[in-house]
Image (cartoon, rainbow, N blue to C red):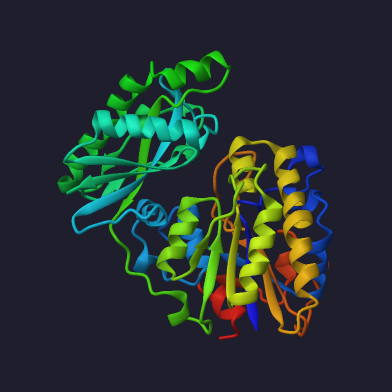
Amino acid sequence: MKYIIILGDGMADEPIGSLGNKTVIQAAHTPYMDMLALKGRNGLLDTIPKGFAPGSEIANLSVLGYDVPAVYEGRGVLEAASMGIDIHDGEMAMRCNLISVNGDMLKNHSAGHISTEEASELIHFLDKSLGGELFSFHSGVSYRHVLKMRGGNKFINCTPPHDIPEQPFKPNMIKAERPEAKDTAEALNGLILKSQEILRDHPINLKRISEGKDPANSIWPWSPGFRPNMKPLFEMFPIKSGSVISAVDLIRGIGVYAGLEVIMVEGATGLYDTNYEGKAEAALESLKEKDFVYLHIEASDEAGHEGDVPLKVRTVEYLDERIVKPIYEEIVNWDEPVTIAILPDHPTPCAIRTHTRDPIPFLIWHRDIEPDSVQTYDEFAAKDGGYGLLHSNQFMNTLFNK
């Protein structure tokens, strides 16, 4: 048996008035996901352990079967791993967004979805201007980057920027959770304010403003931690090899620590315009050689953060038509059986434009599975699924019949 998990990041939502009080998944035309829900088994999964915020790093670690309280060290170290950045003893890594601020307001968490080319130049400029013995900046994809701090204290409270769009940023700056972390918080807050001073008139931002685009005029570091102690998946589950396919550094970094091969796909953007066909093809090619593929699609999450209901509906339909359909139609004819699982990691409701901790719907299908009574794939139908409500690593144990 081979296994593929197709994860539509942030795909789950709440009933929306403009959709006739349907969720995005319910409103979207998804014949292949509905068919697999009908032929397979369904359930709900609580991906956020008690005491943790509903971040993508927490949710994806849970989906992959990890004991989050035991292994979690922040998303910065995970994204660093995907970039090949070594985290040494005494070094703390943080996710570092390029964001757009307007006066005292945090306008958006993505600097208007700045291009990777523009962002890389700004990160290089920041490292040259503000980096040194204490800090170093490392470029990633679009607005998502990594900041390393030597000798930092991870016991600081950092607000994810996607949680506070159109809100004042100063009340949400970094706070020490313990007295010994005060110096770390003050140093990082000083770095944020210095970044705003030097990014304001950078040529890239002046050009973006002239084109009617949001400037990348501030950094926002968050989710600190040190190198995590994670076992590879082949030590936890009955697989010998696997791969991860994603445009997102965080997911690729989880894959590195999970012992998965990271497969890069040309044109994978992490947005609605990503190379769906290329990702599906790469997943199928990898599945011919390996036991397990984790195929991550970011687009729905970004649409949720933007509060764009029509776009989010379209991203779910793209997932069905351009990912699920070609993968199912190929593997259904293979001699070796393949298990398909489909799920989001967390909801990202368009109404609030950030993550929530509600359980998410999942389906599992293979040719010999005994179906339950569920007829369609969505948040409400899954409540009647044969798997009931699972928690964290119970999903992977269920997937592998452990």
Name the one closer to the observer, 231 or 108.
Answer: 231
165, above or below 283, in the image: above
Name the one closer to the observer, 314 or 389.
Answer: 314
Residue 156 horizontal/vertical position (percent): 28, 46
Q: Does residue 157 appear left or right of residue 345 in this picture?
A: left
Residue 139 horizontal/vertical position (percent): 39, 41
Q: Does residue 4 appear left or right of residue 117 in this picture?
A: right
Q: Quadrant of the N terminus?
A: bottom right
Name the one closer to the observer, 145 or 58.
Answer: 145
Q: Residue at x 79, y 79 (%)?
A: 371
**Quadrant in which residue 335 is drawn:** bottom right
Residue 103 horizontal/vertical position (percent): 42, 17
Q: Residue at x 61, y 35 (%)?
A: 306
Q: Residue at x 43, y 64 (%)?
A: 256
Q: Residue at x 74, y 52 (%)?
A: 25
Residue 344 visible: yes
139, above or below 122, in the image: below
304, above or below 255, in the image: above
Name the one closer to the observer, 194 or 262.
Answer: 262
283, above or below 186, in the image: below
State how many labels appear.
Answer: 0
Q: Does residue 44 appear left or right of residue 194 in this picture?
A: right
